[in-house]
Image (cartoon, helix red, strand yellow):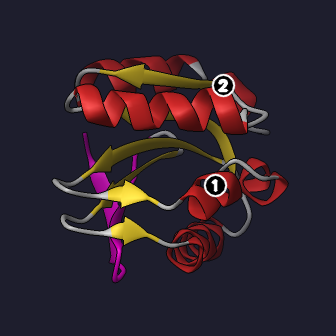
């Protein structure tokens, strides 16, 4: 993965990678709020000048998202910015939380879970057709 630019926010680090791919890593020991998800979206939108991204998400130890932030992350606002999500799950508890996001909040874009960054990146590359050229 070639990192073109990185933005460090309070809740997460956003790395802009090649081919319209962004990696957001939520930092350890957090309950991510709606405001922090909004700050992530704002940073992506500003850096990409509104162009959609393919988003890989990783989450630190003892970090989760509030129910409100999960709902916001799957809203129309996010669909304007994100063409597809690849969520890297590190353990069973994290997989359960990711399943709640996917099945309960039902974002209107492709989302898949992966055991590692490499397989997540491969899948995201196959979703590049979703970004307007």
User: Is 41 above or below relative to 64?
Assistant: below
**Residue in view at x 26 percent, y 46 percent:** 2
Query: Mark 2 packing: few (<14 Cα in 10 Å), some, or many (20+)?
Result: some
Q: Position of residue 28 (x, y in %)?
A: 19, 64
**Mark 2: which secondary structure?**
loop
Q: Give the image location of residue 59, x and y in percent.
A: 29, 50
Q: Eyeballing the image, is 75 above or below 42?
A: above
Label placed on residue 110:
2
Image x and y of residue 33, in percent: 50, 73
Q: Does the stretch in magenta take in 17?
A: yes
Apparent side of residue 89 relative to residue 24 in the rendered image (left or right): left
Highlighted range, magenta: 1-18
98 or 125: nearer the viewer = 98
Circle 1 packing at 10 Å, graded few (<14), some (14-19), many (20+), is many
Nearer-N-terminus badge (2/1): 1
Q: Residue at x 45, y 34 (%)?
A: 98
Q: In terms of secondary structure, where does tag 1 sit?
A: helix
> Magenta stretch: residue 5 in it?
yes
Q: Which mark is residue 73?
A: 1
């Amino acid at each position: 993965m070639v990192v073109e630019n990185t933005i460090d926010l309070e809740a997460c680090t956003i790395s802009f990678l090649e081919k319209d791919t962004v990696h957001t890593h939520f930092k350890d020991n957090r309950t991510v709020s709606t405001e922090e998800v909004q700050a992530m979206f704002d940073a992506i939108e500003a850096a990409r000048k509104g162009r959609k991204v393919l988003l890989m998400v990783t989450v630190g130890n003892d970090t989760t998202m509030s129910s409100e932030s999960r709902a916001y992350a799957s809203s129309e606002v996010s669909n304007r910015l994100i063409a597809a999500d690849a969520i890297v799950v590190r353990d069973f508890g994290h997989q359960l939380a990711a399943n709640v996001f996917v099945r309960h909040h039902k974002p209107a874009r492709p989302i898949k879970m992966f055991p590692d960054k490499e397989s997540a990146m491969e899948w995201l590359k196959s979703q590049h057709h979703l970004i307007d050229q």
